[in-house]
Image (tube, coloured by chain):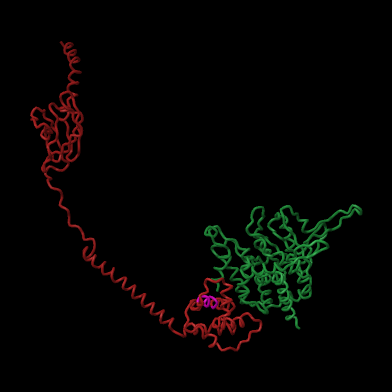
Amino acid sequence: MDKEEKVTEFIENIRTRVGTVVVGQDQVVERLLIALFTSGHILLQGMPGLAKTLLVNALGKAIHLEFSRVQFTVDLLPADILGSEILDQSSATFTTRKGPVFTNLLLADEINRAAPKVQGALLEAMQERKVTLGDETYRLPVPFLVIATQNPIEQSGTFELPEAQLDRFMLCHRLDYPDVDEEEEILKRNLDLGIQKEGQGAVANTEFDIVSDEPVGGAEDLNNAIDQTHRVHVSEVFIKHVVELVGRTRTHPSIELGGSPRAGIALIKGARARAMIHGRNYAVPDDLFALAEDVLLHRIRLNYEALAEGLTAADILNEILREMG
Amino acid sequence: MHVKMKSLLFFFMPVWMATTQGDPANDLQARKSPVGIYSEIRDLVLPGTMLETRPLQQDTEIILRITATRPHGSSFRYDLSYCGLQQGEFDLCDYLQRKDGTSTDDLARLSVKFEGVLAADRLQPNSPGAGKLPRIGGYWNMLIIAGIIWVICPLILLLIKRRRKGQSNTSSGDPEDIADRLHPLVEAARDGRLGTAGQAKLERSLIGFWRDRLNLQCETPVTALAEIRQHKEAGLLLEQLEDWLHKPNPQSPVDLEVLLEPYRNAAGKTKECIDQ
């Protein structure tokens, strides 16, 4: 079995594994893999109860990655995420206690509930991939992927991420509710979860209990996938498409803030990973069209006139894509 | 004697002034007005029963109106407004009559004099000179010409529109049009002679063309593109373009005629893009 086949099998196994616990979220699994293979970060935006945490948990276990979860709250401090130096009174020396950010897969749950200084600390670590505690600078483990979530409806008591910080997320994926068939399947599976007995007590199983701890691949498989992603050919014509799309977001009359060059980079990186996941060694316009929403929507800001007309960023982006093609 | 005369004059002067000032008829003797300008007399006390103006005649010299009538003991006090239409001196009493039909002979003369501004020998106004015609040919000819233009212009526009429609029908009915136009572009794209920007534009134009042709405008761009890829006719050239434009090692030998077959008898966005 050659390298390409191994990567394909690895991806297929991850999808199957995640599919055993999460129903109907193929697209978000693909986006997570894209972020993982391109060393980007992803922001998941969706209502509570859409299995965001379960999904990330299952992905972490499937690839045998270290996984941490931080529930962001208003009283969270930067040290709670990054770590701190603690004074050992017996030896009168400072010892470093690394925070949950020192992991491979970090789930930052409800990131917009934390104060801006905490968000800033995390986003800086995401950007630089290193953390300074006291006098020492520590590199974060490789791979390092932040999967942040935020609830789009609850705005009271939240600190909205500014555009400059949102730009650091390579992708922002909006989760939808499952369709009727998928929801029926979720309920049926929930009925069969069963119970577990410990000692004299018993407790009903949750979806988290049935996530297998057995990984389907390791660091080597992941490295192969990352390597394979970097081998995907991106033609000059594809780059022209990307530049055209990003450029149109800057000149559209309804858009106040268009896509940055970082958006173009993210589109090309994402397109490479998507092409690889779909078994191609070259990127095509389909990859661009598929990833445009996730890469661009959180980076563009509409002007007042467009908002007054009730337009959304998705409407404008779809209009741009239609005009392009 | 001289002192006696002075004292008498001093005694009678106020009495004389009071009597003369209170009689407006005396004022009228000196009153002159230009022809055509209204004048007024206020608080004129005329003895006898109530007066009214005589009905106006066609050739009247004066227009007289009683603007107010108020009782004044056994008489009446009047406000009059009058306007002379001819030069000369006239008696206003000639234009008054009593309401009860009794005679007005007991009224003192109310003389008014009207002076004209024109020379004495000027009896008729200047005759108007012959005016110029506003347009050559006169008003009716202008109307006729405007009417002809009104009818002809829409006809000309209609004919132009029909001719254009006919031309577009002829061109869209031309089965080889789009395919023939695409042929050199596709060939250039295959050989790498079109330039990166041209290749990108061609690919996007074809996607747009098929989205319109397959009525996928309401679909999201992602769904529309996926359906276009799966379409038997649409996918042919797009797949080949994908091979030439995006693959690292394109395989070129293909039959362009087969690829362009779906574009025969077709019209749409691609044509406009190609024309650009």
Chain for colour red: B
Residue sticking out furthest to the right: A90
Query: Residue B212, position in %: x, y?
Result: 50, 75
Q: Where does residue B68 sit, x and y in percent of width and height?
A: 20, 32
Looking at the rendered image, the quarter that the N terminus of chain B falls into is top left
Can residue B211 be found in the magenta stretch? Answer: yes
Tell me which corner region of the image, top left, top right, bottom left or bottom right, holds residue B89. top left
Residue A323 visible within the image: no
First to last magenta residue range: B206-212
x and y percentages locating residue B167 in the rendered image? 39, 80
> In the drawing, does residue A67 fall left or right of residue A301?
right
Residue located 54% across and 83% down the image: B233
Location of residue B161 by image quarter: bottom left
Question: Above or below — where is B236 with respect to A91?
Answer: below
| Residue at position x 68%, y 72% in the image | A30
Does the segment drawn in magenta span residue A185?
no
Numbered label tally:
0
Above or below for B100 versus A17: above
Among all residues in the image, which is located at the extreme front? A200
Q: In the rendering, what colour is chain A?
A: green
Residue A289 visible: yes
Residue A249 in the figure: left or right of residue B41: right
What's the magenta bit mostly, secondary-structure-wise?
helix
B187, A303: nearer the viewer:
A303
Q: Nearest the camera: B99 or A190?
A: A190
Residue B37, position as x, y percentages in the image: 19, 39
